[in-house]
Amino acid sequence: MRILHYKLLTVSFFCLFAVNCTTTEIPLEEDPAPIIALVKYNTDVKTIIDNNCLNCHGTATPRIGGIPLFNYTQVREEAEFGSLINRMNSTTNPMPQSGILSAEKLAIIDKWKADGFLEN
Ligand code: HEC
């Protein structure tokens, strides 16, 4: 009887490990490759903003988004002093509202900040 218990225990331990192994084997999402070149508004940032934000932030007094984001001065102002970078990285209240952008795009915005918000 004792031996049977022991065997059962061993088997259940083995199952536990098997389950653990399969769950830890899920590959982690890879970080985007580091950006070496300087990131600039005109060449890198503008396309991201134009394609993802102007639906709601595209006029001088946007009816929906509140703040305008269609030129360098506006985007820099919001990135440097406003909540643009926080909102773009927010998992609970992201901009765009439809969902956080890809890690590649967010890395471009982060590097733009690190490089000092260059225009061109
Ligand atoms: C579908 C419409 C929509 C899109 C697309 C959108 N926004 Fe917004 N955004 C809003 C609305 C509505 C608000 C105001 C409510 C709020 O803060 O959530 C807002 C607010 C903001 C704010 C806060 C403004 C403040 O008052 O301080 C920032 C910053 C912002 N958006 C940035 C962006 C950026 C950057 C993008 C693109 C990457 C983007 N939004 C895309 C609708 C949108």
Image (cartoon, rainbow, N blue to C red):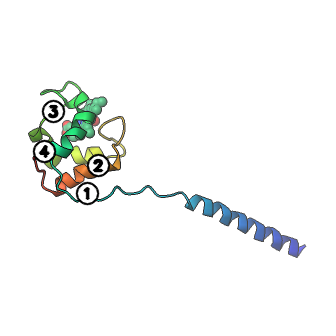
| 92 up-or-down from 60: above or below | below
Q: Quadrant of residue 78?
A: top left
Circle 2 sits in a helix, a strand or a loop, which is it? helix
Tell me if mark 2 has few (under 14), some (14-19) or many (20+) residues whose alpha carbon lies within 10 angstroms of its own: some
Element under disc 1: loop
Q: Position of residue 82 (x, y in %)?
A: 17, 45
Q: Is residue 83 left or right of residue 120?
A: right
Q: Which residue is mark 2?
A: 106
Q: Which mark is residue 51?
A: none
The three-letter code of the residue at mark 3 reads Pro
Evaluate if marks 1 and 4 touch, with contact meaning CB atoms under 8 Å apart: no
Left or right of residue 26, residue 53 in this image: left
Residue 42 seen in render: yes
Q: CA distance from mark 1 to mark 3?
A: 28 Å
Q: Which mark is residue 35?
A: 1
The residue closer to the viewer here, 67 or 28, is: 28
In the picture, the disc for residue 76 is 4
Q: Earlier in the sequence, mark 1 or mark 4?
A: 1
Given the image, on which type of amino acid does mark 2 rest?
A: Leu
- Mark 1: few, some, or many residues within 10 Å (few <14, many ≥20)? few
Question: Does the beta carbon of the residue at mark 3 sit less than 8 Å from ligand 1?
Answer: no
Counting from the top left corner in percent of width and height, residue 87 is at 27, 44
The mark nearer the N terminus, 1 or 3, is: 1
As drawn, which residue projects farthest toward the top? Answer: 63
Which mark is drawn over residue 68?
3
* Distance from the alpha carbon under mark 1 to that under mark 2: 11 Å
Tell me which label, 3 or 4, sits earlier in the chain.
Answer: 3
Give the spatial CA distance, label 3 vs label 4. Answer: 11 Å
